């Protein structure tokens, strides 16, 4: 991410390239990564845990955005002036670009497949309740939930459970693996460039910045871990929740806020505040979560 910020500052990665990089990542590289990580993954052999992962991803996201929205109203923020955007941005944790490399580094590549099934629920929550908070549920772009990542996940699960995965040649696995390996570094470079664009563009409202950081990096993680401890989750799904609970706000919510009538300055502030705080809180939160959930 730092390298992406430097590249932006040196004009090696101008803003005009962002759309092309994003389309390449979302429509080609991430689907390859998803297919390679899910097909043949033994951690996904229990369909009930896969359904539970998706349901949990949806439920935790919805609860988080509602709590964050009511917290914004308690701060005195008004609808149309940041309250709904605060709820959207603070409520959604980073479930892809940052979460994937952290998950793989701690628990291995097999767990990425479980993370993708969890992310299906988060994606559905984002395009229904998340955007619906900004536009009204009747105007939420529900069809956007059927995006390349979700379609690739469902296709990969279909191949996995059908048993066709054993017939996929090693050459194709290598092809998918090599392309998929490009998804995370390229995404992190793009995030770094995007954050560099935002720094200094808005004045800091300290009450919003501090509250969003406390909510996203402390209070909501405790809620997520508490719910995970009460449910009959597999060891792998607990590992996913442990990582997800520690993540900062999802950078993509800035795009949603700008496109669907949200309050862009609030979105920028939440992303910057939680991203900065996460540099210090992620190691502590993950260590605490692993002990709390009995993970090794």
Image (cartoon, grey):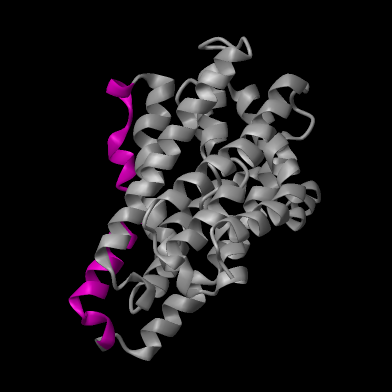
Residue at the farthest left position: 162
User: Residues in magenta?
Assistant: 137-166
Q: In the rendered view, does 237 fall on the left or right side of 21?
A: left
State the image quarter where residue 28 is shown: bottom left
Residue 156: say if magenta: yes
Q: Residue at x 54, y 43 (%)?
A: 93
Q: Position of residue 34 (x, y in %)?
A: 40, 66
State the image quarter where residue 78 is shown: top right
Q: Residue at x 72, y 53 (%)?
A: 284
Q: In the rendered view, does 286 fall on the left or right side of 91?
A: right
Relative to 85, residue 13 above or below:
below
Q: Position of residue 227 (x, y in %)?
A: 45, 45
Residue 108: say if magenta: no
Q: In the rendered view, does 62 fall on the left or right side of 254?
A: left
**Would you say residue 97 is visible in this rendering?**
no
Q: Position of residue 29 (x, y in %)?
A: 47, 64
Relative to 232, residue 8 above or below:
above
Relative to 130, residue 45 above or below:
below
Q: Residue at x 51, y 78 (%)?
A: 178
Q: Position of residue 115 (x, y in %)?
A: 45, 60
Q: Residue at x 38, y 73 (%)?
A: 43
């Amino acid at each position: 991410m730092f390298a992406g910020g430097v590249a932006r500052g040196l004009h090696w990665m101008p803003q005009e390239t962002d759309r092309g990089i994003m389309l390449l990542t979302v429509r080609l590289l991430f689907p390859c990564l998803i297919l390679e990580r899910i097909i043949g993954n033994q951690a996904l052999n229990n369909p009930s845990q896969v359904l539970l992962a998706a349901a949990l991803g949806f439920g935790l996201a919805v609860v988080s955005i509602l709590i964050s929205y009511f917290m914004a109203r308690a701060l005195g923020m008004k609808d149309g002036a940041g309250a709904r955007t605060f709820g959207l941005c603070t409520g959604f944790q980073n479930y892809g670009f940052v979460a994937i490399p952290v998950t793989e580094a701690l628990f291995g590549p097999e767990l990425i497949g479980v993370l993708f099934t969890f992310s299906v629920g988060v994606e559905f929550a984002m395009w229904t309740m998340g955007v619906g908070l900004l536009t009204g549920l009747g105007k939420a772009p529900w069809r956007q939930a059927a995006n390349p990542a979700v379609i690739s996940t469902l296709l990969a699960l279909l191949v996995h459970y059908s048993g066709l995965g054993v017939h996929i040649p090693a050459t194709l696995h290598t092809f998918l693996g090599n392309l998929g390996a490009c998804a995370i570094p390229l995404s992190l470079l793009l995030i770094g460039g995007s954050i560099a664009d935002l720094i200094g563009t808005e004045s800091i409202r300290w009450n919003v910045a501090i509250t969003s950081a406390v909510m996203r990096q402390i209070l909501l993680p405790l809620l997520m871990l508490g719910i995970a401890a009460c449910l009959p989750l597999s060891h792998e799904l607990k590992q996913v929740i442990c990582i997800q609970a520690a993540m900062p706000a999802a950078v993509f919510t800035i795009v949603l806020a700008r496109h669907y009538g949200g309050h862009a300055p609030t979105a920028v502030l939440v992303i910057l505040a939680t991203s900065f705080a996460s540099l210090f809180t992620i190691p502590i939160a993950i260590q605490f979560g692993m002990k709390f959930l009995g993970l090794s």
